């Protein structure tokens, strides 16, 4: 700053407060960019468009990222302790434990995530979330890569390597020897084995998705105390198997004819819209009969019978009864009204025979027994959504960035943006700006408002209706267009050809009369 009247009177000052050797703005920039899933290169691009000064160079950026990751780990550890304390208070209020210091048994949902797409990720993340409070209780980060070790690749026989490794081993970043697929199992084992020492709790109920062997690895964690971990499957993942199995059935029957000489899919056959309806009603059959496996199985079988019903042969006996039933026939029976209209095109016998094995498999009481209490992993999926917003899968991330990002994701999920950021800034020695704090509170309010909106019955019904219409539209397009895309099916050596189209309207000839365009 220079005096306008005297050029000799000047005063220089920094626009940002300095903490130790670094300016606050540098650390705040790193935290801000990481919270939106971006790093230094994106920051440089942002500065180039806005005309702001460039951020610190790459080396100081990494150094400050490492420092922030270490500090945030300490703050997150305190937040996780508070989450366990919340469960203790809940258990004590319900009379399950007599004091806050008593060892307690709790149920947790367990799930893992990879930091990059596919089964070749070098980094993994596993968390346990309380089924009582929906908060993260513990997390474990797995790494099968160390940049320092990579520098010594192929030099393991050198004397210098031995001396270096002895010094490096305590700080080596590799804590997982194995494939990416085994990370969830390894992480779950670590979390369960340290539960007593870290929190004085036992994870005696395991909620999983059935995608990994993690449960087998932790089942006998507390066998010295004659306690076996009980497993329950996520009802949401069980429900999704209906759509998965039916779509797989369609792929298996691609190019094949059923016993009636027609394909499995097509108009009035097994369409995308019908597959979605089967999956929705399967979820209703499970959730509306919590704890009753026999009724779950019965109503699952009823789905196929419902879509095979005719005016002369109604098959609604196993459909859910009462005014709230999704079956109009049963609704009319309960209310005395006449709103039911029979299906114009019920599923033919050939389609029923093809789909029946899938229904039998998914209505098996042995399968449904694992989901009878209707627990879900929705909290884990929500956590992963937050995690991937700060560590996008399509980008490469360094180890320190992953540590910092995973800490931000867990803390924001548990405590919200404002509470955690305020605690992190205080622990780091950064000044909390009133404007920043106001905006953090605004972000938390928006997040809370959107969550409440999406949980309403009207919002869910609207979302299902839009999906139904979208799939119906897709079915019409696919029926009219025929097969237009398949890997390697339309090369020169292939016998497949694109569908013949009308020269007037360029639409597929299906639906046109002999010499007249009907469009």
Image (spheres, grey):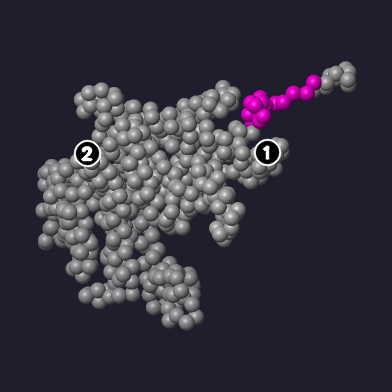
Q: Is residue 287 visible?
A: no
Q: Using the image as rendered, state which of residue 396 and residue 294 is in the foreground.
A: 396
For label 2, the SS is helix
Count neighbours of disc 1 (C-alpha within 10 A) and say few if under 14, some if 14 to 19, many if 20 or more.
some
Q: Nearer the viewer, mark 1 or mark 2?
A: 2
Q: Read off the residue under disc 2.
A: 225
Percent across and percent down for residue 397 are 54, 48
- Compared with 150, 478 (above or below) is below
Label 1 and label 2: CA atoms lie apart by 54 Å
Read off the magenta span: 11-25
Residue at (58%, 49%) from the top-left corner?
A: 164
Q: Using the image as rendered, state which of residue 417 and residue 129 is in the foreground.
A: 129
Percent across and percent down for residue 322 are 14, 43
- Compared with 500, 17 (above or below) is above
Residue at (61%, 39%) from the top-left corner?
A: 63
Snapshot quadrant of residue 44? top right
- Compared with 192, 90 (above or below) is above
Percent across and percent down for residue 328 are 18, 49
Residue at (31%, 64%) from the top-left corner?
A: 248
Q: Quadrant of the N terminus?
A: top right
Q: Using the image as rendered, state which of residue 188 and residue 512 is in the foreground.
A: 188
Percent across and percent down for residue 30 are 59, 37
Q: Read off the residue under disc 1.
A: 56
Residue 429 horizontal side relative to residue 216, left or right: right
Residue 234 horizontal side relative to residue 473, left or right: left
Residue 24 is one of the magenta-drawn residues:
yes
Q: Reading the chain from its start, which is encountered first: label 1 or label 2?
A: 1
Q: Is residue 496 visible?
A: yes
Residue 457 is one of the magenta-drawn residues:
no
- Compared with 383, 434 (above or below) is above
């Amino acid at each position: 700053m220079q005096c306008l009247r005297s050029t000799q009177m000047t005063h220089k000052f920094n626009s940002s407060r300095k903490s130790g050797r670094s300016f606050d703005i540098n650390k705040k920039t790193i935290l801000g960019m990481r919270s939106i899933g971006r790093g230094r290169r994106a920051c440089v691009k942002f500065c180039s468009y806005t005309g702001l000064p460039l951020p610190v160079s790459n080396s100081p950026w990494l150094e400050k990222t490492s420092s922030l990751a270490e500090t945030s780990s300490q703050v997150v550890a305190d937040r996780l302790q508070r989450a366990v304390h919340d469960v203790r208070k809940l258990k004590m209020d319900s009379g399950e434990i007599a004091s806050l210091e008593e060892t307690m048994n709790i149920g947790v949902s367990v799930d893992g995530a990879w930091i990059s797409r596919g089964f070749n990720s070098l980094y993994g993340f596993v968390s346990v979330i309380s089924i009582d409070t929906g908060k993260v209780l513990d997390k474990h980060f797995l790494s099968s890569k160390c940049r320092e070790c990579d520098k010594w690749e192929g030099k393991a026989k050198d004397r210098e390597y031995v001396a270096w490794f002895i010094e490096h081993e305590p700080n080596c970043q590799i804590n997982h020897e194995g494939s990416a697929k085994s990370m969830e199992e390894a992480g779950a084992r670590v979390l369960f084995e340290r539960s007593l020492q870290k929190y004085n709790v036992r994870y005696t109920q395991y909620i999983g998705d059935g995608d990994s062997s993690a449960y087998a690895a932790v089942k006998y964690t507390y066998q010295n105390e004659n306690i076996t971990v009980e497993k329950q499957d996520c009802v949401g993942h069980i429900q999704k198997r209906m759509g998965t199995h039916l779509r797989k059935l369609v792929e298996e029957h691609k190019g094949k004819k059923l016993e009636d000489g027609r394909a499995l899919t097509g108009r009035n056959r097994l369409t995308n819209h019908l597959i979605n309806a089967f999956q929705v009603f399967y979820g209703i059959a499970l959730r509306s009969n919590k704890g009753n496996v026999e009724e779950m199985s019965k109503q699952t079988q009823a789905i196929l019978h419902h879509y095979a019903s005719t005016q002369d042969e109604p098959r609604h006996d196993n459909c859910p009864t009462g005014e709230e039933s999704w079956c109009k026939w049963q609704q009319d029976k309960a209310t005395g009204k006449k709103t039911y209209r029979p299906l114009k095109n019920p599923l033919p016998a050939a389609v029923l025979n093809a789909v029946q094995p899938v229904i039998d498999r998914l209505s098996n009481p042995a399968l449904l027994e694992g989901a009878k209490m209707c627990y879900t992993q929705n909290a884990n999926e929500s956590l992963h959504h937050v995690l991937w917003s700060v560590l996008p899968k399509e980008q490469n991330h360094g180890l320190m960035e992953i540590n910092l990002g995973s800490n931000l994701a867990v803390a924001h999920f548990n405590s919200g943006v404002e509470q955690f950021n305020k605690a992190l800034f205080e622990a780091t020695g950064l000044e909390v700006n009133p404007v920043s704090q106001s905006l953090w509170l605004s972000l938390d309010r928006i997040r809370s408002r959107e969550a409440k909106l999406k949980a309403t019955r009207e919002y869910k019904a609207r979302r299902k209706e839009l999906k139904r219409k979208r799939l119906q539209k897709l079915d019409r397009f696919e029926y009219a267009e025929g097969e237009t895309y398949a890997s390697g099916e339309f090369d020169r050596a292939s016998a497949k050809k694109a569908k013949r189209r009308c020269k007037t309207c360029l639409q597929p000839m299906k639906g046109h009369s002999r010499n007249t365009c009907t469009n």
